[in-house]
Image (cartoon, rainbow, N blue to C red):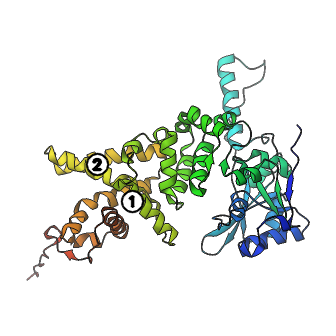
């Protein structure tokens, strides 16, 4: 295959300065370069620096193999089954991701594929009859799954140009070379940055059929940096958006959390709604987020974005609460009006929430925490109307998240949050029995 010629911006032709790059990322780049390896800052970090923005992540591409990276950095580990990468571990749960340049061809194989092959071999034996005379059919093996480092030895590693062509969007296919401080573009990303458009690398329809998650990323990046989705890319999203529901749940929930907790949830979900991605991902979100951008549901997301921009750390269950808690409360209120029993209402509320969490791939822990902080709003909302918060709630491990959600709701409704006061709960009082002394 003929690889594209690179467009190169020399140091004097772009605005990226090493002063703007995370010092830890610079150390990793310099150490790789000093040991004779190619070391590039890659992807969204380069895009953001060219736009004058502070990157959220600093990912590094190199021709060093994972085992070689491990030798250079003692504070590192290899992760990933399909294509192993190295995480350089840093204080405060920070890490720098280092990936070896990938080839255009698929890797040689992975543990999941080998397991499937063994299963199909056994099926052939079951369907095809007896083994050759005098030979016993071997049993179906349950071999040890190889480690990521063992898998990495069988990969097809490639060049920077091949690695760029494997990426999702042109603006994410840019490289910054620490050797001479130039920006390298194999995919037309510089031109698209100038035009302020989001374009798929290669044929959009093919790329989205191969990996529907790329449609979510295209919408997120367009919304986050205020770009337009290029026409052919947009048409491909509209045509193939229903494929999103078939994606791996672990990948879906990871992308969903990036959309929700990335600081641009309002603009991202608005564009995803327009593209029909939300209805493909979770149809209920179409009704939870109505067309009116001034609706309370959208105001919650704008408040969430502001809190994240101010540096507040938002747990995933609290982020989910801004979307799901109050629709669930509306469901509870409708059941109460119908005269349903309290015990039935609790079960019905959980049945309302759980299927949506399962379709998104939300973990059991986050689902349970979401349910508790959501249902607690039933009592806590009275506080906004002059009531008091029951004291027993203060001792619950979900109380702080529930209180933060109430603060978001108060601001979304335009209500000043009162000073928190508690009231005693008769149901919580217990009488001590005196033990009779034996005579």
- Of labels 1 and 2, the one closer to you: 1
Disc 1 and disc 2: Cα gap in Å? 21 Å
- Mark 1 crowdedness (10 Å alpha carbons): few <14, some 14-19, many ≥20: many
Residue 176 screen position, x and y as percent: 80, 62
The residue at the point 51 percent across, 47 percent down is 271
Residue 437, image quadrant:
bottom left
In the picture, the quarter occupied by the N terminus is: top right
Residue 186 screen position, x and y as percent: 82, 49
Decide if residue 157 is in sight here.
Answer: no
Q: Secondary structure at mark 2?
A: helix
Instruction: Report which residue position mark 1 lands on.
Output: 300
Q: Are marks 1 and 2 in contact (CB under 8 Å)?
A: no
Report the front residue among 134 and 24.
Answer: 24
Dot 1 or dot 2, earlier in sequence? 1
Whether residue 411 is situated above or below residue 105 in the rendered picture: below
In the picture, the quarter occupied by the C terminus is: bottom left
The residue at the point 50 percent across, 72 percent down is 310
Residue 59, image quadrant:
bottom right
- Mark 2 crowdedness (10 Å alpha carbons): few <14, some 14-19, many ≥20: some
Residue 177 screen position, x and y as percent: 84, 63
Instruction: Report which residue position mark 2 lands on.
Output: 349
Residue 170 screen position, x and y as percent: 72, 48
The residue at the point 58 percent across, 47 percent down is 219
Report the front residue among 29 and 415.
Answer: 415
Decide if residue 85 is in sight here.
Answer: yes
The residue at the point 21 percent across, 46 percent down is 334
Residue 289 has which mark? none
Q: Is residue 141 left or right of residue 61?
A: left
Report the front residue among 106 and 228.
Answer: 228
């Amino acid at each position: 295959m003929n690889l594209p010629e690179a467009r190169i911006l020399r140091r004097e032709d772009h605005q990226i300065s090493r002063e703007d790059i995370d010092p830890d990322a610079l150390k990793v780049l310099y150490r790789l370069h000093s040991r004779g390896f190619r070391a590039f800052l890659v992807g969204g970090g380069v895009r953001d620096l060219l736009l004058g923005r502070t990157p959220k992540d600093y990912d590094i591409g190199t021709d060093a193999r994972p085992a070689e990276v491990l030798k250079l950095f003692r504070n590192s580990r290899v992760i990933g089954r399909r294509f192993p990468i190295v995480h350089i571990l840093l204080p405060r749960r920070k890490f720098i991701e280092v990936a070896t340049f990938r080839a255009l061809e698929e890797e040689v194989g992975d543990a999941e594929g080998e397991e499937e092959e063994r299963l199909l071999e056994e099926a052939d034996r079951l369907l095809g009859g007896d083994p050759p005379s005098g030979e016993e059919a071997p049993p179906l093996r349950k071999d040890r799954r190889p480690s990521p480092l063992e898998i990495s030895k069988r990969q097809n590693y490639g060049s920077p140009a091949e690695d760029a062509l494997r990426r999702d969007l042109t603006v994410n296919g840019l490289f910054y070379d620490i050797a001479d401080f130039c920006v390298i573009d194999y995919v037309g990303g510089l031109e698209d940055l100038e035009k302020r458009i989001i374009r798929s690398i290669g044929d959009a329809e093919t790329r989205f059929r191969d990996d529907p998650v790329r449609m979510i990323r295209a919408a997120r990046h367009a919304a986050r940096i205020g770009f337009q989705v290029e026409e052919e890319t947009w048409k491909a999203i509209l045509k193939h958006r229903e494929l999103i529901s078939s994606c791996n749940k672990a990948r879906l929930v990871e992308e969903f959390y990036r959309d929700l907790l990335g600081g641009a949830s309002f603009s991202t979900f608005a564009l995803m709604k327009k593209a029909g991605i939300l209805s493909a991902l979770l149809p209920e979100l179409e009704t939870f987020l109505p067309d009116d951008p001034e609706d309370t549901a959208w105001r919650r997301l704008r408040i969430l974005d502001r809190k994240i921009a101010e540096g507040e750390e938002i747990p995933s269950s609290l982020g989910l609460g801004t979307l799901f808690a109050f629709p669930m409360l509306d469901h509870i209120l409708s059941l109460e009006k119908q005269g349903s029993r309290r015990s039935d209402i609790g079960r019905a509320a959980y049945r309302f929430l759980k299927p949506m969490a399962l379709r998104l791939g939300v973990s059991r822990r986050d689902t349970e925490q979401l349910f508790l902080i959501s249902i607690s709003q039933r009592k806590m909302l009275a506080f906004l109307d002059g009531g008091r918060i029951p004291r027993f709630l203060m001792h619950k491990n979900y109380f702080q998240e529930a209180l933060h959600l109430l603060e978001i709701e108060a601001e979304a409704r335009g209500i000043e949050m009162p000073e928190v006061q508690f009231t005693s709960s008769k149901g919580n009082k217990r009488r001590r029995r005196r033990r009779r002394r034996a005579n």
